Image: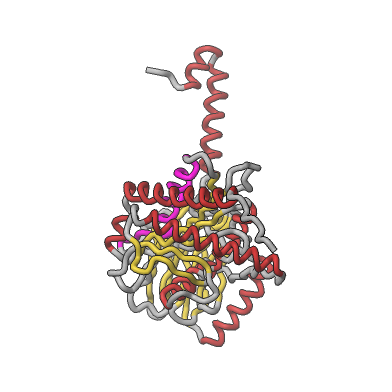
Amino acid sequence: MPQPPFRRISSLYGPAAGAIVAGLGLGLALAAETAAPVQAVASRVETVADHARLVFQMTGPVKPAARLVANPARVIVDLPEVAFRIDPHEGRAPAGSKLVKSYRYGQFAPGRSRVVVDLAGPARIARAETETASDGTRLVIDLAPTSEAHFNAAAAESAAEAARSEPVPAQSAAEPSAASDKPVVVIDPGHGGVDMGATGKHGEQEKAIVFEFAKALAAKVEAGGRLKAVLTRAEDVFLPLNERVRIAHQNNAALFLSIHADTLAEGHVEGATVYTVSTKASDAEAARIAEKENLADKAAGLDSKEDVEQVGDILFELTQRETRAFSAQFSQTLICRWKEAGRLNKNPARAAGFVVLKSYDVPSVLLELGYLSSEKDLARLTSPDWRDRAAGKTAEAIEAFFAARLREARAPAAPPRPQ
C-alpha cells in the first residue's frame, strides 16, 4: 500500500524532515479551510406576535450590515462572502406574514454577499446579528412593525449612508478579449447571484438554467473555430444591467445575445421568443417582460442608473439604424434555426425597451428560451439533451448571421448610375 508523502520522506531523510512536511501539509489544509467562505445551509421566517424573524443557519459567524430601502420597501443585509447552500424552495414567507413578503440571497460583489427582504408592510430593523444557539451559529434578522412615516425617514437616512459606502457590484470576471481577427460574440446569461430571476414551481431557478445554456452555447460557438465567445459572467454572481452592456463594448463585440427564461401567469403559454430593442413595445406582453427585466438591479437592492447613449449627430443615428437592422436580421435567422431545436412561441418575434439591448453600435438580441411556468417548457429547459441540441442550433444561427454579413461585405458595390 503506498505510503503518505511525509512517511516516504521520513524513511529517506529521517523523522525530522517527515515532521516538517507533515506540519506543512497540516498548515496548508488549515489555510485552505480558513479561506473557505462561511456557508448558509438553511433559512426560515418565524412570526412571533406581530414581529418577524428571518433566520439563516450558518457554519460560522458573519458580521451583517442591515439597512432599509424604500420604493419598493425592502431590507438590505450586506455580508462578507457567504456560500449559500440552501434549498431553492426557501425564500417564501409563511402565508399571512404581515412584514415579510419574500427574500432572496446570493453573491453581490467580489467577496460580498447580500440578502434582500421584500417587506409586506413598513418595518424597522430591531436587530441583525449572528448568535450561537443550541443548533449552531445563526444569522438573525428581527423586524418589527412601525409607522409609514418612521419607515420612510429611516429609509432616507439609510440611502444617504449607503451613497457614501455602497459596495461596488461585481465587475465581470471576463477580461477584454485579446486582439483577434475572429468576431466576438458576447453571451449574457441573465440574472445571477442575489438576483435569482424567475422561479419554477419545483424550485428551478432562471439564473441557473440560463447559465448552463450559455456555457453550452459558448462551447458550441468556440468549437466552430471562426468566432470567439465571451460570457458576461462565469459564475453565479450579480451583474448590473449596464455592466453587461459595458462588457460587450469592452470586448469589441460584433454580436450580443442575452439569455432568459421567464414565468407567466398563464401556465399554458409556451415556446421561445426572440426580442430586439424598440422605444415602443410590439405588444403589451413584450412591454411587461421588458419592464420586469429592467428591474433586475432593484431586485438585487441596487438603484438602477441607466446610461443613455446619446450623441445626437448624423453618424450616431446612421450607426444605430444599421445596428438595429442587423439585430432584426439575426433575430429572424435565430427564429428560423430554432424551429429545428424546440417550440417557438405563437408570436416569436417581438420588441421592447430592454436596457441590455440598448447599445447603439452592437447588434443585440434577447432570447427567451421558454417559460418556467409551462410544464412542457420546463421539461425541455431542464433536459441536458435538449440543451445541447438547442445550443447547437443557436450556434448555427450565429454562424449563419456572420456568414451573411461576410458575403454582404465582399459583394461588389453597384456601379454608379449614368448621368
Furthest toward the top, the residue is 12
Foreground residue among 261 and 280: 280
Foreground residue among 177 and 157: 177
Residue at 62%, 55% (x, y): give it: 414
Residue at 50%, 63% (x, y): give it: 328
Q: Is residue 301 left or right of residue 55?
A: right
Magenta stretch? Answer: 202-223
Query: Which color scheme is applied?
Result: secondary structure
Residue 359 placement (x, y as % from top left): 60, 63
Foreground residue among 90 and 65: 90
Residue at 27%, 62% (x, y): give it: 375
Furthest toward the front, the residue is 419
Q: Residue 103's image quarter?
A: bottom left
Residue 311 placement (x, y as % from top left): 70, 69
User: Could one spot residue 179 in this view of the protein?
Assistant: yes
Image quadrant for the C terminus? bottom right
Residue at 56%, 64% (x, y): give it: 324
Q: Is residue 288 above or below residue 199?
A: below
Q: Is residue 419 above or below residue 100?
A: above
Asked if the stretch drawn in magenta spans residue 152, the answer is: no
Image quadrant for the N terminus? top left
Asked if the stretch drawn in magenta spans residue 218, the answer is: yes
Q: Is residue 79 above or below residue 75?
A: above
Q: How many marks?
A: 0
Per the picture, the main secondary structure of the magenta-coloured stretch is helix
Q: Residue 51's image quarter?
A: bottom left
Residue 256 placement (x, y as % from top left): 54, 56
Residue 273 placement (x, y as % from top left): 40, 64
